[in-house]
Image (cartoon, helix red, strand yellow):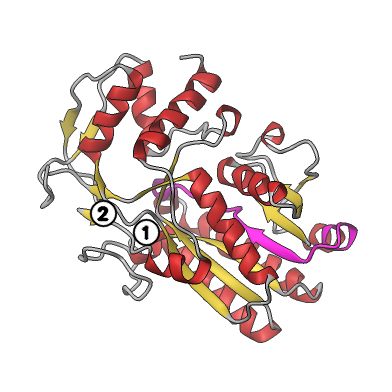
Amino acid sequence: MTWLITGGAGYIGAHVARALAEAGDAVVALDDLSAGYPERLPSHVPLVEGSAHERALLKRVFAEYDVTGVVHLAARKQVAESVARPTRYYEENVGGLATLLEATAEAGISRFVFSSSAAVYGNPDVELITEETPCAPVNPYGETKLTGEWLVRAAGRAHGIATVCLRYFNVAGSAAPELADTGVFNIVPMVFDRLTRDEAPRIFGADYPTPDGTCVRDYIHVADLAQAHLAAVQRLEAGASGDLTVNIGRGEGVSVRELITVIGEVTGDDRAPVVEGRRPGDAPRAVASAARAAEELDWTARLGVRDMVESAWRGWRHHHGA
């Protein structure tokens, strides 16, 4: 089978491309290279430069490579940017998805995996977030992911496309230094950036109702996340029909202070963090229930937080010379 991976040269996309290729699937990557790098991809994985908005290009790629399934990862992903530019986020994340789904249906492709996010839940006050926890996103990014899920399921029902929506929690780490996250938008690279510039890490709020007062999150190694995509692909290849929505997390909470402590141990720079005020919209706790992923995908995360930090640090030094 041949899978088209949109955003395939990105941080997560390249990990997914490598996981599928190593499992024996044929893979073709589609990426506009706004945040992707061709060198992340295995040499035998073809890269088509373009986006999900280009209907004619999609038609050509589907035919030329005999695509039998789609993994859609390409999207705008920064919460603050989504608040400042909501129309851009709806145009990119929802408009591009609509075009891709239309082209998928027209080509007779019947398998589709969608990259969603825990941002669809907003800030629920629960110990573990299950897939039945009500969705109430608090920013345009989360809204576009929830709208995307609705659209994927509706298109699946209308056109006989079997679908899987994967709701990622906090992604970190790297399977290889060259595949590392090069942006400074998530907490691990943000702390690395501060330390590299000889500045103390920052904690935004230490008065939350959590054991140490800092926010608690569920972190997932990107290599485990790639294996979750492989499990979703294999489910669809085995003939599963209908739609499945599943959380992708470890089911374990780690506080910001605990994470910074691990980063200090790994980097050898354990300076005390600076505590600043809370950021608007941050939930005290957001931890996944991973039960459905184990049951439906036979998938469980294997790597822990130290694995994430150690691999991310190797990647940071590879790209930044730290």
Q: Is residue 193 above or below residue 213?
A: above
Snapshot quadrant of residue 130: bottom left
**x 42%, y 38%: residue:** 185
Left or right? Give the position of 115 relative to 110: left
* Residue 25 lies in the magenta stretch: no
Callouts 1 and 2 close, C-beta under 8 Å: yes
- Number of marks present in the image shown: 2
**Image quarter for residue 164?**
bottom right
Q: What label does residue 113 carry, if any?
A: none
x, y (%) of residue 136?
33, 69
- In this rendering, does residue 76 appear at all? no
In the picture of the structure, the residue carrying the numbered disc 2 is 281
- Would residue 320 appear left or right of 120 to someone viewing this image? right
Q: Which residues are magenta?
A: 61-81
Q: Earlier in the sequence, mark 1 or mark 2?
A: 1
Label 1 SS:
loop
Q: Nearer the viewer, residue 102 or 9?
A: 9
Residue 215 seen from this side: yes
Q: Which residue is mark 1?
A: 139
Q: Position of residue 314 (x, y in %)?
A: 48, 24
Task: Tell me if mark 1 has few (under 14), some (14-19) or many (20+) residues whose alpha carbon lies within 10 angstroms of its own.
Answer: some
Q: Position of residue 315 (x, y in %)?
A: 51, 26
Q: Residue at x 68, y 52 (%)?
A: 20
Secondary structure under tag 2 reads: loop
